[in-house]
Image: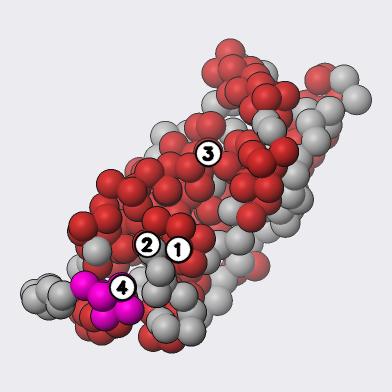
Amino acid sequence: MTRIGAGALALGWVLAALAQPVAAYAKDSYYITPAEVDLDNLLAPPAALGSAQETADLAAVQKAEMERSAQDSIDAEEDHNRSVFRFADVMGPGFTPQKLPMTTAFFARLLTDEKQIVAAAKTHFARPRPFVVDSNLSPLVFPKKTPSYPSGHTAFAYVTAIILAAMVPEKASAIFDRAATYGYNRVVAGAHFPTDIEAGRIAGTVIASVFFHDPRFLSDFDRSRQEVRTALGLPPLPDRKH
């Protein structure tokens, strides 16, 4: 398919995405709701279809596809899974679901809230995925037909990184490096543009900040942090002020 044909398809895809109500994504919230995090007005709009910025954004995805190695592909496919345990490689031995039942449930609740908030922004911006804009791309994963901007996987990676770093500040640098890799793997996979990743990083940072102002979150955070530090053989830290 030519770029012109793909552009026409992308326009149709945008219109279809705009027709989807936010309620189509919605589930029950645990700590915070989309109304508390106005990403529509906090994020810059994505590049317009056919603009120089969008062309450069797409070229970066094409380059990542061309240069990805077999190991890069494996890593990107595995990072398609949104789980706190994708950070186990930097958290160390003991960071397992079996040893962290409370933490497993805690981060599952965070994911539910994050997905709702980002879904609302995706519907607002309605940016088509790279493989919709350019049908010659060969993505490693095929996400649901949801818009591309901001990257929900990246938002979750940074929500997770911020919270894990608050739990285990001794590993903060490695945790944030892992979040950056997690986000870039969405470009390697052909699922997102680089600017989707940057918007996801900003979105995740904002969402995490709102979490830390919720008393229910803070109570669960304190208990989860104690569980994580015990599993990792680290001394306890004082509870955060509620």
Determine the residue positioned at 56% across, 71% down. 26
Q: Is residue 188 left or right of residue 197?
A: right
| Quadrant of the frame with the C terminus | bottom left
Q: Is residue 195 visible?
A: yes
Q: Which mark is residue 88?
A: 1
Quickly name the residue at label 3.
184
Per the image, label 3 sits on a secondary structure element best described as: helix
- Using the numbered discs, state the Cα–Cα distance from disc 4 to disc 1 in whole angstroms: 11 Å
* Badge number at residue 96: none
Disc 1 to disc 3, how far (Cα)?
18 Å
Q: What's the mark number on residue 91? A: 2
Q: Amino acid at mark 3?
A: Tyr
**Residue marked by disc 4:** 232
- Marks 3 and 4 in Cβ contact (< 8 Å): no
- Which residue range is magenta in the image? 229-234
| Camera-side residue of 230 and 160 | 230
Residue 18 spot, x, y in % from top left: 66, 49
Task: Tell me the CA gap for discs 3 and 4.
Answer: 28 Å
Residue 26 within the segment the image draws in magenta: no
